Amino acid sequence: MNMLNVLLIENDLDNTLLENSLKDYGFKFLKSKYSPTFLALTKEITPDIIIFNLDTPSKKLLTDLQTLNQQSPIPVIMFAGDSNIDTINQAIKAEVSAFIVDSVEHNRINSIINVAIARFKHQQSLNNALEEARAKLEDRKQIDRAKAILIKTQNFTEDDAYHTLRKLAMDRNITLGEMAKNVIAMSELFK
Amino acid sequence: MPQLSLKAMKTFIKVTEIWVPDKERTQLEFGSGLYGGLIDFKAASEQQLFAYNEGLPGKAWAAGHPIVLTKFEHSYFKRTAAAKKAGLTCGIAIPVFSGDFLMAVVVFLCGDDEDHAGAIEVWRNNPLSENSLNVMDGYYGTLQHFEAISRQISMPKGQGLAGLAWETGLPVLVNDISKADTFIRASDAQQAGISMGIGIPVSDNPGHSYIMTFLSAKATPLAKRIQIWIPDQHGKQLICQQGYSKNSNDLAEIFETITVNKGVGALGRVWLTGMPVITGNHEPDYNPELDNLSSMLAIPVIKNGRLKAIVSFLF
């Protein structure tokens, strides 16, 4: 028995093949039609993966997927009849893990799901690394600004400013970036 | 929720406002304010105007000295319904004058809950005895016994917080009142849980001197830090004479080593204009539990049209 919970969102297409394939591979799934309550439903049942089987994704659906990706990202597979490049681009932009056009084949379902999950995890690790790099860069900027404040107000050398900042951070058991923000906030009061 | 965040802050003062004369200088309009999470009360205040002798700021303007309003209901206070909703029950208005002319009115609003201990008093010189002060008005919250004692005392010039502030014409900050020889009510203060106090000379009308005293307990400080800035002996720069907070704050101490030139920065502007200022974070999502200082009220102490000192309350 596969332990993954699947949320299957379908429209009026014939879904028998997809549903049978999920059953055969042992996936537990809940069927639903796409509606304005999609995000609330996802939040409530917390699926491990969402599979769409529809003709073409609406703008509202793609917007919902972007929101979902920002709030609590999960792997999304989309089987669609629409092969328009704009639709594909928008789906990719909404961080859909796999977009399959005109093809629901029984023997490929399991591998499509596995590849989508692997791709999703890889994408998540890239996103996390990017976020970490952004945060480090932001910290770097704040630290430089805080050092400049200390240099200007205390006539410190750059080295003195850095060591003072580090000591203040260590005494408070907070990061250098957080301490830099405190120094900047304090200097703002006297501006 | 706003009320919860204020409860967590546990500072004695819950709202701080500055009211300034409008263009015609005939009524007071909103200058700036610190409201914590009291968004509705802030909204009710920002559009408010006070004529001379109207509402709490207008009354302080007309009286020419600080006034304390211990109950809003059935009083001249104009924002009673909004204040009640925000849990505010008492207000203190301090007019800042340069000679006969009003620069601004600073208003502090407090809540009457059981969680805080502290007092705000207005002392005035006794017309019958030239060299002593009496409590003219005061807000004591739950400290009824301390209030009774305080209202009976005559404070000689040069003694106690109020007497010292009167004699020197400068703010006086005592950080352990129970051990201070100069504080006449030391044992009563200790019993009431009061640990620190600051006395600030305010309006000095001919024949009348007024001193404000702010007394607070350790658990509910007036502000996260209080500083006294004074002009140096050449009157060229401001220097920090004293800084106090419940817990030591080495970041604040670093900034207390700076000197301030007239017109430069927030304190320099207070010196240049004689106007109180509020700076920093006014956002409702500000977390009062963090140890960083993110807002400041700076009040000038003016005598004979000259700046004697600036008292800054950091939150």
Image (spheres, rainbow, N blue to C red):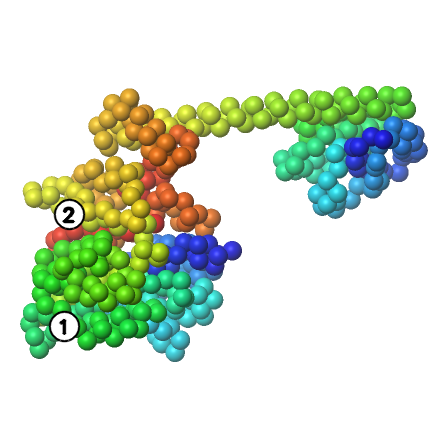
**At 74% from the left edge and 34% from the top edge, which residue is drawn?**
A48
A137 lies left or right of B23: right
Q: In the rendered image of this protein, does residue B129 appear above or below residue A159?
A: below
Tally of marks = 2
Residue A40 makes an appearance in the image: yes
Q: Quadrant of residue B71?
A: bottom left
Does label 1 or label 2 sit earlier along the sequence? 1
Residue B256 horizontal/vertical position (percent): 22, 40
Dot 2: element: strand
Look at discs 1 and 2 and give the one toward the viewer. 1
Amino acid type assigned to the residue bearing label 2 in the image: Ile
| Residue under numbered circle 2 | B230
Residue B299 horizontal/vertical position (percent): 24, 54
Q: Residues within 10 Å of mark 2 (few under 14, many from 20)?
A: many
Q: In the rendered image of this protein, does residue B18 appear above or below residue A172?
A: below
- The one nearer the camera, B307 or B210, is B210
The label on residue A119 is: none
| Residue under numbered circle 1 | B154
Amino acid type assigned to the residue bearing label 1 in the image: Ser
Q: Quadrant of residue A108?
A: top right
**At 44% from the left edge and 65% from the top edge, which residue is drawn?**
B87
Q: In the rendered image of this protein, does residue A107 appear above or below residue A54?
A: above
Label 1 chain ID? B
B83 lies left or right of B216: right
**At 25% from the left edge and 64% from the top edge, which residue is drawn?**
B189
Q: Residues within 10 Å of mark 1 (few under 14, many from 20)?
A: some
A11 lies left or right of B214: right
Residue B230 horizontal/vertical position (percent): 15, 47
